[in-house]
Amino acid sequence: MKKIVSILLAAIVAVTLCISMSATALAEGSVKITASVSPSSLTGAGTVSVKVTVQNDTDSEINDVTVVFPGDDSENIGSIPAGDSKTRSDSEWNVSEDMLDTELAFSATFTDANGDSQTVNTKTLTISKKESTVAATATASVTKDAIEKGETVKFTFKLKNEGNVTLEDASLKAPPLSGGDQLGKTFSLAPGETKIMTWETALSESVDVKPVFSYTANGDEETAKAGTVSVTVGGEAQASATPAADSLEVVATANNTQVKAGDKVSFEVTVRNHGSQDLKNLKVTDANGNKVTFTGTQLNAGSAAKGTAEVTVQETASFVFTATAEDADGNSVRAASDPVSITVDSADLSNALTMDVAFIPEVSKAGPVDFTFKVKNNTGQELKNVVITEATLGEIASIPSMTGAEQDITQPVQVDQTTSFVFTISGELPDGTRLESQTQQPATVTVKQSFGGMSTMLILLLVVIIAIAAVAIALGVFIHKNKKAGYTAFGKRRDGGTEPQQHPRQGGGNRPAGQGAGRQQRPPQVSQQRPRSQMPREEIEPRRQAPRQRQQKPPAPKKGGKGYSDRNKF
């Protein structure tokens, strides 16, 4: 009996410990790590902006947190309290050529509340290698195109890098200025940058200045030519200039010079033929190849033609429209407009892409919960590859292209227990700049689980304990009854006998004929019963016992007589 009780108690303790351990594991939570990189593509080795966030969703502080970038670039960011987060940022993280188009993972190591060292990793991300585009736009202008002899004028030359490759060893020559030698110093120009150079000189004769920028891109030598800038001295045209070459004039105006990214700007371009010859095959384009639409391609002497162009502007830029035509002899005539500067209001990238989350904060049982994500595009531009993710759930929803200011997405999320979610949204601007933001507050869904999860386990444990207690009580009652009846727990009598039954006396049985004959039959043995007043309170009636009987034997004969037998004789 003691062995059975010990086994039952051991089972209860084991079940209780298992449930306690399960409850502790559920309460501990997890440590999450996310990473974002901008831009997400490069033409070659370069720098990107990186942000890695470690979120402590456990109920204990984690210590000695070290964030590791690919290439063993690590930094210790200290401790993170329970429910808090810390971020390691690097605005100019170097990316080598062999890291492009390769899956990169960021990690964090830390010491948990038990003193154990742990490591968590981000999902892999890739910085893609994009094809290089070499494009440069050169423009030139002068303060006056007609001066008196000896008067000083200032020339302005601009070179803008319209491609995605850095222009190296760039230089400017503008003959006949400085005898055709290089003006200024050699320079480099990163993608999107503009270099402005000026040159002041006194002129004693009319000149046609033909500026040319030279540079190296991707190891190749390239040039960018600006339109010819002519200055007339003393009211006389330069003798070397042909009438047709001096006759062409281009003037460009914009309907709006202060716009938002993605707005369309309408340009009106007027081309005048001041010469005495008719011009044909008239074409006008800007540096990006945007064409100006005219009603015809013939421009008669002394006439003018007007055309329009509509350009979508993504960033601040200067637009120069260049006209080309041919005279009657087939000579090419070319002229460029003055730059028209369009300023684009810079977007606040910190608030460019945001998201609000709506959900039911408390549910009665585990299951799918609908989350509605209100995505806000505050850039005024088209966003591509907009993706909503969560560290533990992975990708939840995506929008291939988003041009509107707002868009709602409803997506079910499986919630098995009370959980806090931190959602991340990311996207790309047309120029490849990556945007990313997280929800300000964790989205916590509380699962009551009145008849599920841990509650069900506790109920089952209670049922098991009650059943064990009932079995123990029943065993106790059974044992008590047997003791009162004079039996042990397993039906044995305390005197060593078993259930009473008729049996012969020791030495009886099949004896020889005449042996033991003539003995008197003993009266049946009657068990003594206690008075009813001394019976147990349970009023349990004792089991009736059959009277013990001895085997009837014949009376013993006289010694020495017939049939005598000595019982002590063996």
Image: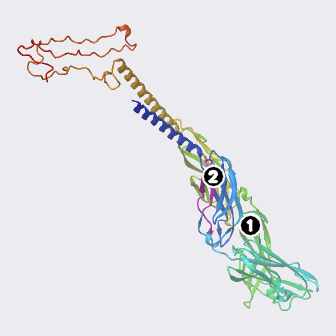
Rendered location of residue 217, percent (x, y): 70, 79
Along the viewing direction, whichever of 158 and 552 lies nearer the viewer: 552
Q: Earlier in the sequence, mark 2 or mark 1?
A: 2
- Residue 344 as seen in the image, left or right of residue 547: right
Which residue position holds label 2? Answer: 111
Q: Is residue 70 above or below residue 180?
A: above
Magenta range? 105-128
Picture residue at 58% right of the left edge, 43% below the top? 27
Helix or strand or loop: what does disc 2 sit on?
strand
Q: Is residue 127 magenta?
A: yes
Which residue position holds label 1? Answer: 315
Rendered location of residue 215, percent (x, y): 74, 81
Q: Which residue lies furthest to the front in this view?
A: 560
Which label belongs to residue 42?
none
Q: In this view, does 453 lie above or below 303?
A: above
Along the viewing direction, whichever of 36 and 503 lies nearer the viewer: 503
The answer to which image quadrant residue 277 occupies is bottom right
Q: Does the magenta stretch include residue 285?
A: no
- Type of residue at label 1? Glu
- Residue 177 as seen in the image, left or right of residue 455: right
Picture residue at 5% right of the left edge, 14% below the top? 562
- Type of residue at label 2? Thr
Q: Which residue lies furthest to the left in this view?
A: 562
Calculate the distance from the C-alpha at mark 2 to the C-alpha at mark 1: 47 Å
Number of other residues with Cα within 10 Å of mark 2, as a class: few under 14, some 14 to 19, many 20 or more: some
Along the viewing direction, whichever of 496 and 241 lies nearer the viewer: 496
Rendered location of residue 420, percent (x, y): 61, 46
Helix or strand or loop: what does disc 1 sit on?
loop
- Residue 372 as seen in the image, left or right of residue 285: left
Foreground label between 2 and 1 = 2
